[in-house]
Amino acid sequence: MRFHLLGPPEVRQGAGLVDVGHARQLSVLAVLLVDVNQVVGVGRLLARVWGDAPPRQAKAALYSYVSRLRAALDGIPIVRRSGGYVLEADPSSIDLHHFRSLVALGRPAEAMALVRGEPFEGLHGAWFDGLRETLAGEIAAAELDHTDARLAAGEHTSLIAELTARTSERPLDERLAGQLMRALVGAGQRADAAAYYSRLRDRLADELGLDPGPALRDLHASLIHRPQWSPQRLPPAPADFTGMAAELAALDLDGPIVTITGPAGTGKTRLAVHWAHEHAADYPDGQLFADLGGSDPADVVREFITALGTGPDGIPPEPHAQTALYRTLLADRRMLIVLDNAADTAQVVPLLPGTPRCRVVVTSRERLPGLVTAHGARPIVL
């Protein structure tokens, strides 16, 4: 049996709807589902369903509703305990609790798929109104997290219309504004991003007497006014490099990602760094380098964002948002990125720029088949 509260409340058994009665009886069920596996006192139930001044017959009506719900929810117990009632069920069978667990696990896309409309639609009262307001904030935050993940995956162009509509509804939401700016820049519409920022800045000043916050100002500076310098972060070129002519020729071939793999001591790093220095001029927007041995890719993403000219206040706290910002900063740059000593594909994926204008060279003792099959990397095996 599945319980749906993130939209018109309903109960489903397989593909069919379970009849759980009229709105007041459904309200009793909803209160018990919100506090599933916890005792809800009779007084609290009455206040939530009927308000602060329930009629004299409310308690008798409550007992009747609970009895009918027990019959309708065959197999789902509603137990009288300690002056109240507890509905015993698996929280994952209730969309509200499943939504919150998915958000906590960092899976906003799956969480958002559970939302079917306005939570508790058709149920009235101050308690439901307050809960709806709370959930609206949670859903908006999950939606923003989901958008960050989509930006990180390079969905800039497809998000512009959606984000434009959402910023019209919430014109002073600076995180949402930053997402629209990143989408515009990632789609090659840098001038539109600058114009949007100017309009938002003027609106904040006119309506609230405020400037944009430091995160949005720094994002604007990073995305719109690209620094004139470019990071040059390659380690020194290896001395007396000789040989490996075939491997160097293979590195010269086209392709945004190449892997250099082989056992320890075969010269993977020397080859990658030598080639990178030889071709640095082909990447006028700079070169980035990271030794991934034992590194958390989230730390490397933040390091790269800083190297690309973003100050600490401009780096969002969420890992998905950081990856989205990193890829947006690289959207119209031509850069070389050398990722040395990768342990596996999962360590590399957050550091991929998402644009064929950049070149990524990865070294590893492992073959990294995931990069080859899922991301089109060209392998060089030593």
Image: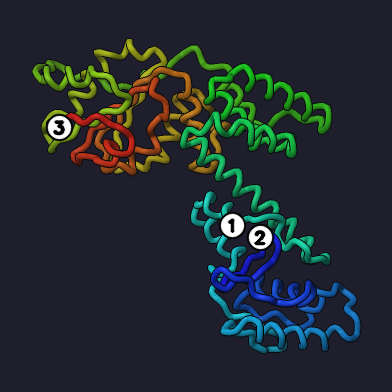
- Precedes in sequence: disc 1 or disc 2: 2
Tell me the number on the disc at residue 190.
none
Q: Which residue corresponds to mark 3?
A: 381
Q: Position of residue 72 (x, y in %)?
A: 66, 82
Q: Residue at x 54, y 24 (%)?
A: 187
Report the residue marked by disc 2.
6
Q: Residues within 10 Å of mark 2 (few under 14, many from 20)?
A: many
Classify residue 295 by image quadrant: top left
Relative image position of residue 102 (x, y in whole percent): 52, 57
Mark 3 vs mark 2: give the one in front.
2
Tell me which numbered mark, 3 or 1, is placed earlier along the sequence.
Answer: 1
CA neighbours of label 3 inside 10 A, class few (<14), some (14 to 19), many (20+): some
Say whether marks 1 and 2 touch (CB < 8 Å): yes
From the viewer's perspective, is the residue at label 3 or at label 1 nearer?
A: 1
Q: Residue at x 83, y 27 (%)?
A: 206
The crowding category of the residue bearing disc 1, from other C-alpha atoms within 10 Å (few below 14, some 14 to 19, many at least 20), is: some
Q: Residue at x 23, y 32 (%)?
A: 363
Give the CA separation, mark 3 to mark 1: 45 Å
Query: Residue lying farthest front?
Result: 16
Residue shown at 49% from the left, 12% from the top = 228
Task: Please name the residue that numbered disc 1 is placed on.
Answer: 114
Query: Label 1 vs label 2: CA separation?
Result: 7 Å
Q: In the depicted view, which residue is nearer to us: 178 or 18?
A: 18
Q: CA distance from mark 3 to mark 2?
A: 52 Å
* Amino acid type, mark 2: Leu
x and y percentages locating residue 165 in the rendered image: 69, 35
Total count of labels: 3
